[in-house]
Structures are given as C-alpha cells and as structure tokens.
Image (cartoon, rainbow, N blue to C red):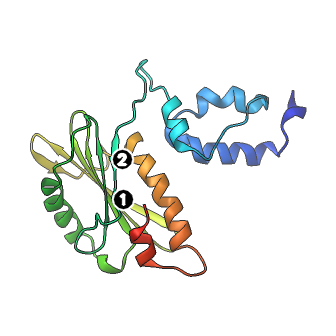
Amino acid sequence: MMGLITQPIGSFITIASTRFATFGILDYLWFTVLSGKFRLNLHSSKRVMQALIVQGGTMYKLRKLEGEQDWLDADGVKIYTISANEEPINMVAFHQRLSEVKSEITLEWDQTAAFVIFHNGESCKYLVLAWWGNDNELFTSVSVQVNGVWVLDPTKYSFCLYDIEVIWKERNIYIETIDCESPSLVKYRTSR
C-alpha cells in the first residue's frame, strides 16, 4: 500500500493539512489520503466546499457571495458580502461598524491591502475585517452583532467556513498583485 504514495508522505500530509485543516475535514479524508488511492483536488475550493458535510448531518450550502470591483470604502478597503438567506445585504449598518473598528486599529488604511466581509449569517451579522502586514501575514478582526449590539470577542467569535472562501480568494489575489515582482495596491484593490 505505501508504494502507491508518489511523494514523500511528510510533504503530502503538510500540503493536505494546511489546505484542509481549516475546513475540519482532514480526519474524514485521512484514510483516503494515506492510502494513496485518492488524489485531492486542492485547486478548487468551491468543489471542496460543495462536497463538505458539516457535523450533525446537515449539508454545507452555498451562500450568496458578492464582491464587485468598485466596492471599496473611502480608504480603499475591498468589500464583499455573504448572505445566508439570498437577500441583498444592507451595507449601511455594516459601514458604521467598519469605521469604528478601523478607528481602533492604528494603520494607514489608504496604504494597506485590506478587505472586509459583511456577512448576514443565519442567526447574526458578522463583520470580518482583514488586512495584510509583515510582508505576508493576514490579520483579522471579527465583530458580531448580538441583540443589536456589535461585539468584538475573539474568544467567542471568529470568521466561519463561508468567510474562508473569500479569504482563500484574497490570498491568491494578494500573491498575484502584492507579493510579486511588481507590487500594485491599485491592482490588488480592483481584483476580485
């Protein structure tokens, strides 16, 4: 059986774990990966996400995800929306919270590669602000609206499975536009 694995097992497990550990499905696929009979398609997060079954027996269901090229705040932070109920997002309520969060973080936002997700979840509204720093690190701040009040508590709330789809897309855009030979913040901001 071990002869079927074509690359060193340590590097294959590392690749698989970094790509899938976040999704929480590595244990599910572990036996298949180690057997070498199954090759994971690591290049299409949408296919992986569509196939993902969440514990408890409910299927992962795609949510309405939008992000237009001209959706930027006043400082150039890219805006995405995710809706659990397929309804358009009322961005006005999110913009006020975005301004508050940004004012609490000492950054030159107009010179920073950043994006935000306005997420109407099934039970709460989430605002996921993410920015790149230290060459290639992604920092995040997650606010959740609970009983009409925005809460920032990293011990209770974080980005979720649906937000990771945007984060993965933004990772690839960052590599293509900023972490490259000719970095361009303008190109980063207009890429979706």
Evaluate if marks 2 and 1 touch, with contact meaning CB atoms under 8 Å apart. yes
Residue 127 appears at what percent x and percent y? Answer: 26, 52
The residue at the far front in this view is: 69
* Residue 68 lies in quadrant: bottom left
Question: Foreground: 158 or 57?
Answer: 57
Answer few, some or many: residues within 10 Å of disc 2's Cα (few below 14, many 20 plus, some between 14 and 19): many
Locate residue 165 relative to residue 111 in the image: left or right.
right
Identify residue type, mark 1: Thr
Secondary structure of the residue carrying tag 2 is: loop
Query: Label 2 belongs to which residue?
Result: 159
Label whose residue precedes the other's in the sequence (2 or 1)? 1
* Residue drawn at x 23%, y 52% as measured from the top left: 152
* Above or below 94: residue 31: above
Residue 186 appears at what percent x and percent y? Answer: 41, 77
* Residue 114 lies in quadrant: bottom left
Question: For residue 140, which numbered disc appears in the image?
Answer: 1
How many numbered badges does the structure rendering display? Answer: 2
Locate residue 1 relative to residue 179 in the image: left or right.
right
* Residue 117 lies in quadrant: bottom left
Identify residue type, mark 2: Phe
* Residue drawn at x 74%, y 44% as measured from the top left: 12
Question: Foreground: 9 or 96?
Answer: 96
